[in-house]
Amino acid sequence: MSKVGIGIDFGTSNSAAAVFDGERLQLVRLEQDDDIIPSATYIDRSLTAQTGQQAVSQYIADNTGRTVELIPEVVGETSQFVEGGGGDEVAEVDTATQKIYGAPITDSGMQGRLFRGTKRLLGDETVRRLMVFDQPFRLVALITPLLLRVRQSIEQQVGAVNAAHLGYPVNFEGRDRFANDLALNRLGEAFNYAGIKTQHFFPEPIAAAVSYLHSNPNAEGELLLTLDFGGGTLDFCVLRRQGQDFEVVATHGIGLGGDHLDQLLFRKLLFPHLGKGQVWRRRGFDREIETQFPFEDFEELLVNWAITYTLNQNRYTTPVMECIAAGGSGQKQFERLRDVIKHNLSYLLFSRIKDFKAQLSTVDQAVLDIPEIDLAIPMQRSEFETLISEPIAAVAQALDTVVSKAGLQHDDIGIILRTGGSSLIPAVNDLLTQRFSGRVVDHDPFTSVAAGLAIANFRQLSYTP
């Protein structure tokens, strides 16, 4: 078979792969009807793994309507000698063993655990193993099934694969100064177990630039700046073109992604309709007690959909049901909160929020429509931009930082390439236009990195920080 370049973009939220034979660039079909696959792994009680959309669907099916029952975990045992019998009889000596229980943290009814966004943990030295039904799983083991599926999908298209260019963010999340080294070591080990033995790691924003320059060889401008704004990270690079080749002038990245914006929308739009700010009335011994409903206990679990199901236990559901029974102006809000918990709707809510956010990128007003909990919430794009003003300020600061690192002025750069799903937000484009008027271009927001990696693999491009 003729030479083929392979590129794999393992992302925080989604992953993609591409192949390039020197002339034709193709995305690899990773799902039954999609080239993009959710970066998700679901492990059930038999320790069997499912990946992609099937993993997400199985998680939702297994936890919808399920009451969570937490039982105490045995953390140790004590033994002591005791004598049986009585009176003058010589008794046998028995051993009495007593189990020591910890806090009630084991979910006895859980059918499986879902892991998504695991890429964010790769650079954290304190996260070494995660427990799955009393079995410690290394992060590498949680990533490998998805990468194996990606490799097998590529092989269905081009035959045996053991080498590829693999994308990575400029900076992984993690505060330790060795976070990037640790993350790359872990990612490399996972790819190795998945059968990709020859690995060429390549920064994601540079890969996006490679695919753009391949598609637009006659684009004018010696200097190119890429902004890659994905689900988990924001990455930049500045390249200097040298004929058909280029020199990397500077790179930069921060831990900010579209998932953070989704959580801001959830808090702003949905929390007031789920009981935030409402009063909790219940009967005491001699009088009615009235306090603020403890919504803060629910907040973090609601905005992290993979663990929202844990709200379906008595200590959370009892106050909700008491508020519903009490009636009053907040009854409808608490009924919605009950339904979100009982029917495990958090993933659906975030899916609608993502669609809603995309609509606000094309129209001045959109409606967050969630008939499952009888909600239709309009929002102006201007309101959304006010809500995300702080993250956009962080984008601006990071953008100016990479230009400064390159030793350049904004006017020096001829091409501004924006890619990644969150780069489609008008406020991001406005920011770029303010600094680089007339020089901003779009390029395949969800697949440009995978395409660039395949081209880089074919051309055997390399990058050393």
Image (spheres, rainbow, N blue to C red):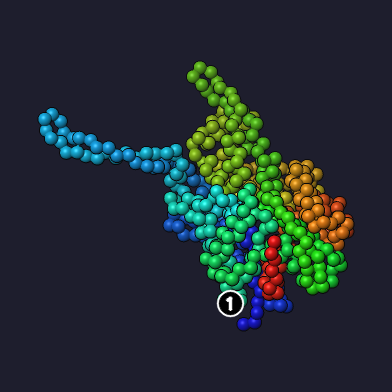
| In this rendering, position of residue 303 left or right of residue 43 | right
85 or 231, nearer to the observer: 85
Residue wearing tag 1: 159
Residue 409 lies, in percent from the top left, at 86, 55
Could you say whether the residue bearing mark 1 is in a helix, strand or loop? loop
From this view, report whether residue 167 is shown above or below residue 24.
above
Residue 258 lies, in percent from the top left, at 69, 51
Using a 10 Å C-alpha cutoff, classify the residue at mark 1 as few (fewer than 14 neighbours), some (14 to 19) or many (20 or more): few
| In this rendering, position of residue 177 left or right of residue 285 | right
Q: Residue at x 43, y 46 (%)?
A: 108
Q: Residue at x 65, y 54 (%)?
A: 172
Q: Residue furthest top?
A: 286
117 or 83, nearer to the observer: 83
Q: Residue furthest bottom?
A: 1
Q: Residue at x 86, y 62 (%)?
A: 414
Q: Is residue 332 visible?
A: no
The quarter of the displayed image where residue 8 is located: bottom right
Q: Residue at x 56, y 39 (%)?
A: 338
Q: Is residue 31 visible?
A: yes
Number of numbered callouts drawn? 1
The C terminus - image quarter: bottom right
From this view, report whether residue 186 is shown above or below residue 353.
below
Residue 254 lies, in percent from the top left, at 70, 51
204 or 178, nearer to the observer: 178
Residue 224 lies, in percent from the top left, at 81, 62
From this view, report whether residue 160 is shown above or below residue 363.
below
The quarter of the displayed image where residue 122 is located: bottom right
Query: Which amino acid, by three-letter code, is at mark 1?
Result: Gly
Q: Residue furthest left?
A: 88
| In this rendering, position of residue 30 left or right of residue 402 | left
The N terminus - image quarter: bottom right
